[in-house]
Amino acid sequence: MSATAVSIASGQKLRFWQTTVGKKAVMAVTGFILFGFLIGHLAGNLQIFLPPEKINHYAELLHSAPALLWAARLTLLVSVILHMWAALVLTKVQWDARPVKYFRKENLNSSYASRTMIWGGVIIAAFVIFHLLHFTFGSVHPNFDPKNVYNNVIIGFQSIPVSVFYMVAMVLLCMHLYHGLWSMFQSLGLDHPKYTPWLKRFAKVFAYLIAIGNISIPAAVLAGFLKPVAGV
């Protein structure tokens, strides 16, 4: 019996966010915020392929309004926490609903991305922490210069293990985005036989573009197309 059924049977009135539907709505809304961030973040990062002063000026522009910057950071932090909370609770509800494992489980109606969603999310969360320490705070960067984002990115990705870890994380992000974006459409009530194939294609293309765009940066560094520039 689900947590919702137990609460209703005992006469308690659940708040919307306490229900399974409510938690899915939390995941959808926070996921939408995070998807928007990924688009903006990628657009900013791809300026690494332009002259060095472009991305350095972009970084200066972001830090010129610290109040807005920290408001955005706090919004993202709250969104990540709520997104992970809802995901973990929903996963626990699913596991509790089936305390005895299947003798033989056939994954006929689920994709690999959906079956590994929770573990992929944990790895991505670990990557985000490393990414912040690497490029935002510079505490694990070999030669961090807060005024030279261009060189920070290139020097950081000249480490093969770091670049490989980054690219693997982007592959997992692609899988997470595809399933997450499609689930968001369903949670928002946009699932319809007429539009479902198009929504799935959109989710797949969006996930691929985000992953390929991000992977292109360490790949270009390792290939020697991007190199540090003195005096920028």
Image (cartoon, grey):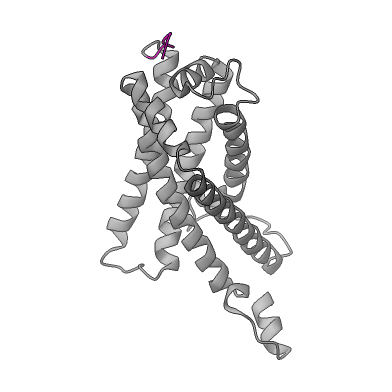
Task: State left or right for residue 194 relative to residue 230.
Answer: left
Residue 72 on image: x %, y %: 50, 49
Name, please, the residue furthest toward the bottom: 11
Q: Residue at left 65%, top 79%?
A: 4
**Closer to the camera, 203 or 46?**
46
Extent of the magenta region: 226-232
Q: Residue at left 68%, top 75%?
A: 3
In the picture, the quarter occupied by the N terminus is bottom right
**Residue 212 visible:** no
Task: State left or right for residue 59 relative to residue 162.
Answer: left
Residue 189 on image: x %, y %: 39, 71
User: What is the total number of numbered labels drawn onto the structure image?
Assistant: 0
Task: State left or right for residue 195 relative to residue 165.
Answer: left
Residue 73 on image: x %, y %: 54, 47
Type of secondary structure dominating the magenta stretch: loop
Q: Residue at left 54%, top 73%?
A: 21
Q: Residue at left 43%, top 21%?
A: 150
**Closer to the camera, 5 or 18?**
18
In the picture, the quarter occupied by the C terminus is top left
Magenta residue check for 228: yes
